[in-house]
Image (tube, rainbow, N blue to C red):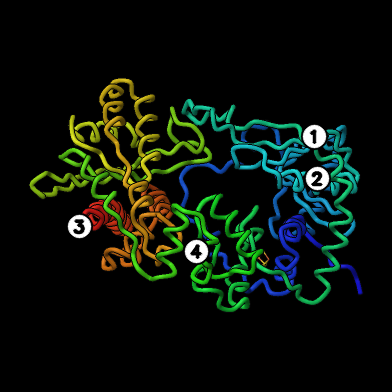
Amino acid sequence: MAAIRLSKSKLIAFRQCPKRLWLEVHRPELKDESGAERRLQAGHSVGDVARRLVPDGLLVAHEGDPGAALAETRKAVASGANRPLFEPAFRHGDLFVRADVLFDPKGAATLVEVKSSGSVKDHHFEDAAIQTHVLRGAGIDVARTHVAHVNTKWIYPGGGAYAGLLTEVDVSRAIAPVVKEVPTWLRDAQGVASGREPEVEMGAHCHDPFECPFADYCTAIAGPGPAFPVEILPGNGGKALARRLREAGYEDLAKVPATKVPEGLFRRIHQATRSGRVHLDRGARRAIGEWAFPRYWLDFETVAFAVPIWAGTRPYQQIPFQWSCHVERRSGEVEHFAFLDLSGRAPARQCAEKLVATLGKRGAIVAYHAQFERRVIRELAERFRGFAPALHAIHDRIVDLEPVVKAHYYHRDMMGSFSIKAVLPTIAPALDYANLGEVQDGDGAQGAYLEAIHPDTPRERRAALKRDLEAYCAQDTRAMIVIAERLVA
Ligand code: SF4
């Protein structure tokens, strides 16, 4: 039987999990690609910018047509012009790749792989090694291999000037031993691809380094697991304890004896899980009782771009475009304030201005997982010096509801999570986020924002997105009040 030809992405899939490769080759229809769904995006991709920064480059087109891309690459290399090539295609043996940028293809070439991450990740070395192996096999003298990643410290000056966005790291020496392993990977991958569906148990590799698109399929064939798997125990300590419990033969937290679980958070989770009784102690009332009125229940929604679109911002900087604030007076009266900018212009200055005008000078500002709100406010203070004193004062008034929940409340339906979305349904099922419109979480809010500011989005659609964004953000701050009321009841 002829050996199966593979692309770089299939070999990378094999490196993550042999079963994933097999499914990619034989059952691609099982793939859940909803996570990869492309929404309307603002601005350029990292790859676009990388190409714009290289003068006189030649783009080898023919996406989805390897034969045509190979032919055009051969022609470009043979032409003698020695121009930098974008997306050139190469085959060596049974392996096909497309490089990102290739400088000096006729001489001592430099191969550059462009990544949108903020640093070089472990899996980038394998990726670069596969590319290097194939290009060398195809007759290119690859003298250097670089990984270009986004420089998260760089500040966009505006006007489309993106020089400085990317940092190039020479990985030639680091990948030298890895390049030698590629033929073995290929042989093993071909063996898997031409065999029967391998049996692989699900585990951490299903999410690392990529979310596997076959997770639904594998979950379904794995059948129902324990009601409360020991892996729900939170944090690194919880993961380590879960590993020990698994090794000792325990799968379901509800069946673990109390003596196996240390005092503190894990014991509370364990007891509530075993008994089915909610844990709530008086410490919550004491902690919340110290928060001064008026209480400002605050939540931000932010957006981050790999390629900044607004001057003065950094790649992946969290830029607030929306906030909700419920103001609760000692009398019990509650008033709602909100900010949402869907103009597509830089929203941060106006966001800061309205925040300062709304949050007054006294009273506790309550956030959930407050380190995020604190960071956003610190960054606003750094960027807009005129508001800095007021923003620093706001920063210092922030208190956090999440640690209070974590220390004093647990319902077993939270399944080890203390996120507001896990806690709220156990206290006020009617306020479940699943009952909201299209926007039900932070990622959904970012996607809705990007779609709403895109010039091609029709007015009615924009109005619908605005309604959903407002409802979602208001729910976050309303939810905090409801949770706090339950904790002090
Ligand atoms: S879900 Fe996990 S076990 Fe299943 S194919 Fe993907 S990586 Fe492999």
Q: Which of the two labelled residues, at mark 3 and mark 4, occupies the earlier sequence position?
A: 4
Q: What's under tag 2, amino acid-wise?
A: Ala
Q: Secondary structure at mark 3?
A: loop
Q: Which of the two labelled residues, at mark 2 and mark 4, occupies the earlier sequence position?
A: 2
Q: Which numbered mark, 2 or 4, is in the foreground of this view?
A: 4
Label 2, residues with CA under 10 Å away: few <14, some 14-19, many ≥20: many
Name the quadrant where ligand 1 sits.
Answer: bottom right
Q: Which numbered mark, 1 or 2, is in the foreground of this view?
A: 2
Q: What's under tag 3, amino acid-wise?
A: Ala
Name the residue tied to disc 2.
129
- Measured as percent of width and height from the top left, residue 266 is found at 47, 56
Q: Which numbered mark, 3 or 4, is in the foreground of this view?
A: 4
Give the residue drawn at x 40%, y 67%: 413
- Measured as percent of width and height from the top left, residue 214 is found at 62, 68
Name the residue tied to disc 4.
258
Q: Which numbered mark, 3 or 2, is in the foreground of this view?
A: 3
Going by the picture, which residue comes out furthest to the left? 331
Q: Is residue 84 left or right of residue 35?
A: right
Give the Cα distance between marks 3 and 2.
Answer: 60 Å
Name the residue tied to disc 1.
110
Mark carried by residue 489:
3
Front residue (pair 489, 465): 489
Q: Is residue 367 left or right of residue 335?
A: right
Give the Cα distance between marks 1 and 3.
Answer: 66 Å
Q: What's under tag 4, amino acid-wise?
A: Ala
* Quadrant containing the N terminus in the rendered view: bottom right
Front residue (pair 257, 140): 257
* Quadrant containing the C terminus in the rendered view: bottom left
Give the Cα distance between marks 1 and 2.
Answer: 13 Å
Q: Which of the two labelled residues, at mark 1 and mark 3, occupies the earlier sequence position?
A: 1
